[in-house]
Image (cartoon, helix red, strand yellow):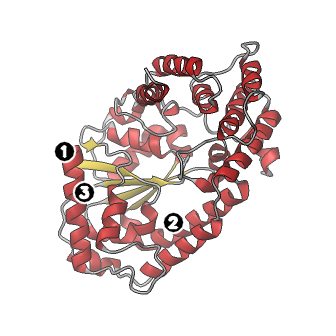
Amino acid sequence: MPVSLLVRRALLVRALGNFNDAVRDLDRAIQMKPLEGELYRLRSDLVKAQPGDGSLDTLASVAARVPSSHLSAVHLHFARAKVLEDLGDFPAAFRALERGNQGMRAHFPYQISTRLRQVAAVRKSFDGMDMVKMTARASSDFAPIFITGMARSGTTLLEQILTAHPDVQGGGEAALLSRTVRETIGPPEDLRPGAVDVTPKGLADLADRYSKRMLARFGPAPRHTDKSLQTLLYAGPVLAAMPKSHIVLMRRDPRAVAISLYKQVFRRGKQLFSYNLDDIRQYQDSFDALVDFWQSRLNARFHVVAYEDIVQAPEPTIRSLLKRLNLSWTEACLRPEDNAQPIQTLSSVAVRQPINRDGLDRWRPYAPMMGYTVV
């Protein structure tokens, strides 16, 4: 089997929670392409390194044979960082992360100013929107639950909790909403005058097209989830178009989010801001500005949930959320690890575990290197 198919299968079985099978496929791929750094990075995410297991020696041997400017070498820095973290050497892990992120930024340039202009344009586009009036004219009965938040904030855990409910069909990251918004009312971040036109007809078209696409892909269900990190760009028109819809936003300690972002390699073209700590902080500030903008206008169907509350007091937090979403209580939502829904995100390993507090303090060993104060 070609390496590309082995990797694809490894990612598929990882999404289904079969981590041992994923490791076996990656090991076979490494035997066939021993200088491909991405394979070692993917494997390091699935296996916890142990003292004396030779992981660091293996990575050093491979790195010595890979040109430092190659993307493969960049992946090796991230793999090394994960191994060093497993072994408890956080300063060395952070140095490896710095080299890895610098390499990613060199391969994938990014300007945070683009994001800042985007957020300013969204706020300008929708600042005068009369939500009450627009919602009153809408007639759609489709009742999706839109899950959003910063990347690495716990949105996948939230999705697994909600889709454990028997009335909720998971839509994952369907990417249908963004496409439909742009077709019907225009790209909300477009700075050109008249680029965004929020009219009753446009909102009706948005609800009609979106609901048909979701039902065609996922089938009928009382409720559907749709998870996207971009929902805040058009939250107002979406809720106005579908009066029975809700948005649930996951909040998490920004320090935990920042280090988690810095430790990841995302799919090509995704989360490019994450390869620089200053850009991460500015992006977080811009995200908070959008949250504040919409929360003051959409409070009735705009629900903010703290990751820390979910993991420290799961039952009362989840009970409260289900009630606000007009969903009945079920114990299944306390056991997201039993949810068989495939997980395509970087959180596929963590959310296969029972709800726990393990992720609360993972940022703390990195705090001195990141300039954070630990209280």
Residues tagged 1 and 3 counted as in contact (Cβ below 8 A): no
Q: Percent position (x, y) of residue 281?
A: 68, 59
Q: Percent position (x, y) of residue 262?
A: 67, 46
Amino acid tagged 1: Gly
**Residue at point 38%, 79% (across, down):** 196
**Residue at point 71%, 46% (across, down):** 103
* CA distance separating discs 1 and 3: 14 Å
Above or below — where is 134 with respect to 298?
below
* CA distance separating discs 2 and 1: 31 Å
Q: Which residue is mark 2?
A: 291
Q: Secondary structure at mark 3?
A: loop
Residue 320 placement, left or right of 241: right
Which of the two labelled residues, at mark 2 and mark 3, occupies the earlier sequence position? 3
Marker disc for residue 48: none
The answer to which quarter of the image holds residue 366 is top right
Q: Which residue is mark 3?
A: 143
Q: Nearer the viewer, residue 138 or 93?
A: 93
